[in-house]
Image (tube, coloured by chain):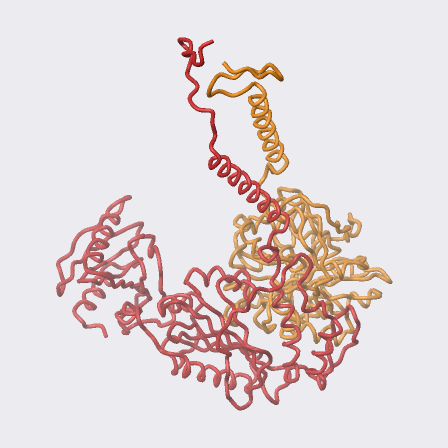
Amino acid sequence: MKTNSNDGDQTRPGGISRREFLIRAGATTALIAGASAAAYKLWQPKHFVPGFGVQTGLQLPSYATAVSKVLPSLAIAHGSDHEKVIRAVIGALGGMGRFIQHGDVVVLKPNVAFDRPPALAATTHPETLAAVAKLVLEAGASKVYVADNPINSPTGCFLKSGLRQVAIDLNLDLMYPEASSFSPLQMDGEILKHWTFFHEPFKKATKVIGVAPCKDHNLCHASMTMKNWYGLLGGRRNQFHQHIHSIVSDFALMMKPTLVVLDGMNVLMKNGPTGGRLSDVKPMGTVVAGTDMVAVDSYGYTHLMERDLDELTYIQKAHDRGLGNKNWKDSLYKEVQA
Amino acid sequence: MPSATPPPKNRRQFVRTKVTLVERVASVVCLVLLAAIGGYVLWKGKHFDPALYSVRTESLQTTTNEVKGEDGTVRGADARPESRVATAPKPEAVVAASAAEAAQTPDASAPAEGSAPSGPPIKGDPLEVNLPGTTPMSDTEFYGPNNLFEKIDGRAPAYLTFNFQQLRCRSFSVTGAAGSYVDVYEYRFDTPINAFGMFAIERDTNGKKIDFAPDGYSGELGYYFRQGVVYVQIIASDQNAKTMALAQALARDRAKNLKADDSGLDGRRQLPSTGLDPATVQFVQENAQGQDFLKNVFQAVYDYKGKKLPFFIMVTKPEDAAAAFKSFQEFCGKFGGTAKSLPDVNGAKIFSAENFGTYKVVFQRNGQIGGVFDADDIDKGRQFVEEYLRGELQ
């Protein structure tokens, strides 16, 4: 046996000294501890995809007005002239003065997702937007922004849909999305926790009105007032298609608008959301407006698209989450003929 | 003291403690590699490729391009230019304005927040049309399977189902008709059969047949047809005579310049034309009539002696057709249905079946399987099939 005279460690031939054993054991322990600590540090309890995780971003204020116990929260108007029908439906709600006060800065959010002509009903009809904008201006709004972040080229979409001409004619501020227009928005929704948001138009806004067409949608069955807010988000929105119903219902949480207007004058009944043929469009001569987008969309789906509400999952989800009432007849409503 | 002591009993002998230099080096290399991989994963996680999660800013970048074409579409109105609010440039200075606009608002072509620079653009031949009365409103746009949603959003999955390859599109303004334009969309698929499939799904059943493309029709606002592997949509902005005339001219131009190819459409050719409602011709890629063995099926509705008879046809290998026929007959005899064999006609096996109050008369001959389905009159269905098999239906 070999003796280590310095520390008294003894090593059998072919063996290791106590010191070396302690060093190796210590190194191994340190390595395991380090690996464990690193793993703990890097471990994430849930699958992480940017946008679906936790992050702190800005939160939108509620743009809703006080609930009235006397005036309707939902109105339906029928007729053939866009402006007359819009005036009738807003009149049935108590007039635009109920929602817009003198000096308000108003954001109008049309659906301009595609560079399609108005007749195809894939976008908000220019006459509908014009009628709403006129009422807002008449109510005393100091500034009216028109904003959307289209799927296609923004200028092309606003140009071909005829909405740019409306903005020009009525002296509205048409706001195209630019790189600096977006900020992270905290949503804390069922799926979307945060996402990049077209924030620029909302920096000074005091009121928000959604003006949406009523149309078929290949993935979520229908695009109406709730789905319309999709157009305010940036990023690669096609990811939403995986959880489309949950995400659309998240929009009812994200945005508390002053008013929503559903344009059912001409409804895209099939091949949505783009359409492409006049035969896809059915004249329905109806506009629905209200403060509860779930109720408005419920009416739109059943009475304008003539479909079974039970198949529209995002409405069910929004209703179940207390974000609105799918039973629109339970609300105070008024139906008028223009 | 002896130099070597045998190990005590019941004690495992220590085998080896010496580690060679090679082993030490190898282990160090492994550790370094592991550390490097771990470090890379950590770094990559914190510097993920934003292009995966953010908007492709091509649409923003095309902003200035599109302005070029406003000459032909804007009615001469102007708007107030403001730095943060994008408004209409003066039409007479559109090209200059677009350049100036780009210079003044560099952000317009920069990536949106949280987004990355656009990937390489999808290439293709520009859509050039030399027709009097047209002015291109913008450059040709190209979209592939990975970014088709940027053009048609939620409609994209329907096209991808049919192996969509590329969309080439361009807008043309109508000279002398301010505000009017025609959009040309060319959806390219992998095969003519898939192009036909998508075309058939979106077909307007009230469309009018056109004479310059075999699968095509005109609608109130445009022209729609399949030519080879391309499904073409020509969409007019309005119903003005001038706009519609230009739309037709563009449609004819595209039909003439796109390669004709009907390969794989044998089944469609075997659909008889007598009594056929052309608007009802459909291509079903998978699971026709809920049967997984019925693939690449053509079907249409026929007006036969006052009855509407849906008829289908599938062309495949003879052994596959025979197997499909057998499976179909077996299936029709299940779940309360009845299926019985009928006498052969002109070399074809036939069975008829009743399921849930509707009738089928199905035949198989060589690589052909087809027949009437969902009929409410079995006699008419059988007559139709037998006449077809005898070649009495053209």
Residue found at x 64% / y 64%: A111
Count of numbered circles on the image = 0
Q: Find residue B83 and report its horizontal and vertical position in percent.
A: 79, 71
Give the left or right position of residue B82, taking residue A234 as reference.
Answer: right
Give the left or right position of residue B308, taking residue B56 as reference.
Answer: left
- Between B146 and A334, which is closer to the camera in this rendering? B146
Give the left or right position of residue B164, taking residue B332 as reference.
Answer: right
- Examine the rendering and report whether any part of residue B78 can be seen: yes
- Examine the rendering and report whether any part of residue A327 can be seen: no
| Residue positioned most to the right | A102
Q: Find residue B318 and report its horizontal and vertical position in percent.
A: 19, 60
Above or below residue A71? Residue B236 is below
Q: Quadrant of residue A94?
A: bottom right
**Chain shown in red:** B
Q: Find residue A259 and report its horizontal and vertical position in percent.
A: 73, 57
- Colour of chain A, in one word, is orange
Q: Find residue A46 and report its horizontal and vertical position in percent.
A: 59, 39
- Between A19 and B47, which is closer to the camera in this rendering? A19
From the image, which quarter does the C terminus of chain A lie in?
A: bottom right
Above or below residue A94? Residue B59 is below
Residue found at x 70% / y 73%: A164
- Between A65 and A288, which is closer to the camera in this rendering? A65
Above or below residue B140? Residue A37 is above
Above or below residue A251? Residue B96 is below
Residue found at x 16% / y 53%: B341
